[in-house]
Amino acid sequence: MITTPQSRIEELTSAGSWGDTTLHALLEQHARENPDRLAVKDQPNRQELTGDPARSLSWAELARASDNLARQLQAAGVGEDDCLLVQLPNVAELLVVYYALSKLGAIISPVPVQYGSHELQLMAGVIEAKAMISLRSFREGSPAATAREALPNIQVLAFGDEISLDPQSDASFEPVHSDANRVLSICWTSGTTGTPKGVPRSHNMWLATARATMNAGGYSAEDILLNPFPLVNMAALGGFLFPSALLGCSIVLHHPLDPGLFLQQMQDEKISFTIAPPALLNQLAKSDEMWNQFDFSALRRVGSGSAPLAPWMIDTFGSKYGKEVVNFYGSNEGISLFSTPEATPDPEVRAAMFLHSGPGIDIETKVADPETGTEITATGERGELLISGATVFDGYYAHDNVEVFSDDGYFRTGDLVEICGDNGEFYRIVGRCKDIINRGGMKISPAELDVALEKHPAVTEAAVCAYPDERLGEKICACLVLGDKQTAPSMEELQAYMLEQGFAKFKLPERIELFDQLPRNAVGKVQRFALQDSVTARPEEPTQ
């Protein structure tokens, strides 16, 4: 599958932004040149998570394991351009799947392990999934069993059952194709319509993103990277998997986030670079005692993002701990901006502003009025961020993309930015044009929750909105209008109701506020910003 017009391929190829390198070709190169170098290592408590011992794979073993898995999948009927839904935690097998499907010319569509039957059914239907790859057990549950129940008409292949990981087999697999413009993955994001949207990305798009990340983080082939994000979207793929593939450096896996274990891994594995959630870095910056418990001498710098960073945290890391912080701003669709200590030494600037042009930034950006599309150029003005370039996707999968791009082909990010700096050289993110809730980096569409809540027998109107949370950035509040003589459900009852409909736990409301009526505009649409203002102004009280 190729989604990119030939004219765009030719333009970016002639500019040197795209080439002919594929993910699996990079694997073969590292397996040949550095066969014994560590490629991927599980976190030490894997046994507790999946019941399997922790694995470590060299580049040669990763190549052999992906060859072996490609043969197994081919025997199961998986072929070129087939889309596979993949639900695995951060284990070595997930990297093997990426490389194996790359060799097969198939398309990986990875989803978080938190997703339940509701999300699996939606996504499998959109991509017309040929099969699904899962795991026999994870924590107290069985993702494979959940998938088989949710998707009775789709073949579910589980590690430990139908498929296995064999890094010792010597039988090679000949890749089906070597076109770097073919779609490699379809990751997922949530839109305001309430349905997940698939983001197809080619090898070239991912590698362009990886080069931008490497430039900002100063990655090298000798790096040992610690990845605490699920390998299903931009933070982990653009920050770890594809830079590792380009350079041949090592990835140590982590997730779900366990701060104590994460810090222990940083010391024990001699981690040289990681990207960590802002809340964890804030905690470290507040506690000299916690920082001094460990030996972080191998760490040269650390990245963060997904929420505004605290200037005091950046200053503490730089001036007290001697470790600089890089601020990343990215998305599945191809946003790729960053703020580095070299370009923005002032912590106040680095915490909130991003250069929109310069070395290592292989995209073009502009700001436009969200309603009229008129370009905005004056410092201090605000508008929607628009981007174009080598990292940017071609449009959502099986979706009407008419309003996704501007008339001149720029992706409309939905993010509201302010033009800053003496010469307007920075963007500062000030909000969102789209109604997306960002709970700890997980993007949640309010609309699908609205619809589900309004089905509750005690509710006549419902809408959710975000409210601020120090640890996660945002949480979800259910704003309810009750029917006559109806009693408000307790939080426990409401969450159980949502779970019964198959929603993932991270999408559950954690606060309930009652309204006589919901604020609506002239055409009857709920004004979510007004809800959010009202909820934020109210004192948060325990809901009975």
Image: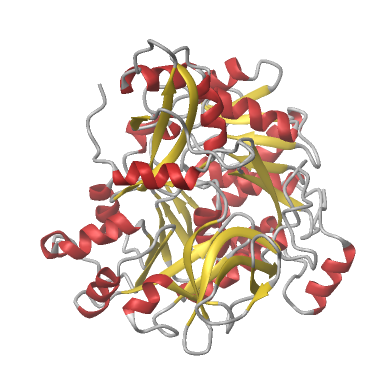
Residue 491 horizontal side relative to residue 77, left or right: left
Q: Nearer the viewer, residue 232 or 460?
A: 460
Examine the rendering and report whether any part of residue 86 can be seen.
yes
Q: Is residue 211 above or below residue 257?
A: below
Residue 79 horizontal side relative to residue 263, left or right: right
Tell me how many marks there are. 0
Image location of residue 437, percent across then percent down: 47, 45
- Identify the residue at the far left of this view: 289
- Identify the residue at the far bottom of this view: 422
Q: Is residue 149 above or below residue 26?
A: above
Examine the rendering and report whether any part of residue 244 can be seen.
no
Q: Nearer the viewer, residue 43 or 504?
A: 504
Kindly identify the residue that appears in the image at 61 percent across and 51 percent down: 63
Q: Nearer the viewer, residue 93 or 462?
A: 462
Image location of residue 449, percent across then percent down: 51, 30
- Identify the residue at the far right of this view: 6
Q: Quadrant location of residue 270? A: bottom left
Kindly identify the residue that appears in the image at 37 percent across and 71 percent down: 351
Q: Is residue 254 above or below residue 292?
A: above
For the C terminus, give its image quadrant. Answer: top left
Image location of residue 186, percent across then percent down: 67, 45
Q: Is residue 351 above or below residue 121?
A: below
Kindly identify the residue that appears in the image at 65 percent across and 29 percent down: 122
Q: Quadrant location of residue 178? A: bottom right
Image location of residue 84, percent across then percent down: 69, 35
